[in-house]
Amino acid sequence: MNNGITLQFDQPDLGSRIETLSEAELDNLSFGVIGFDAHTTVTLYNTFESKYAGLSRERVVGNPLFTIVAPCMNNFMVAHRFEDAATKGTALDDTIDYVLTLRMRPVKVKLRLIAAPDVVTQYVMVLRSV
């Protein structure tokens, strides 16, 4: 991990800390990380999320998150929160209970939605009971 410190899904400074991780460190996290740009194109997708979602990194990175990769998140609970934060120029750091449904049986998860006006990458973190 980053300087020997394990990052936790619920730690207060996760948004700023996740930015400092290498790809290998992201792959060692015990929760899913999906990073995307202002156009919702996925730029980061860690091994944990790939394994549990059943989607390869090659299939996900470079595609729009809310229309191609995870259309089940294209709603007011997830995608619109990012849109609202961007429109208002405010930070977003919300944790919600959610049910993922794309190509799998419904799976209860916690999602952490993280964005900041001065940071290029926005994140959906996925905490699963495994």
Image: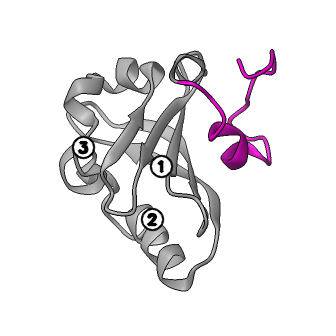
- N-terminal label among 1 and 2: 2
Say what secondary structure mark 2 lies in: loop
Q: Quadrant where the N terminus lies? A: top right
Three-letter code, disc 2: Met
Distance of label 1 from label 2 (alpha carbons):
9 Å
Q: Nearer the viewer, residue 15 or 101?
A: 15
Which residue is rendered at x = 42% and y = 73% of the image? Answer: 83
Residue 125 % position (x, y): 54, 41
- Rendered residue at 80%/15% (across/down): 4
Per the rendered image, the range of residues in magenta is 1-22
Name the residue beneath numbered marker 1. Answer: 98
Disc 2 to disc 3: CB gap under 8 Å: no
Mark 3 belongs to which amino acid?
Answer: Val
Closer to the N terminus: mark 1 or mark 3? 3
Residue 43: horizontal and vertical position, in percent?
37, 41
Which of the numbered marks, if any, corresponds to residue 77? 2
Q: Which residue is mark 3?
A: 69
Quadrant hosting residue 78: bottom left
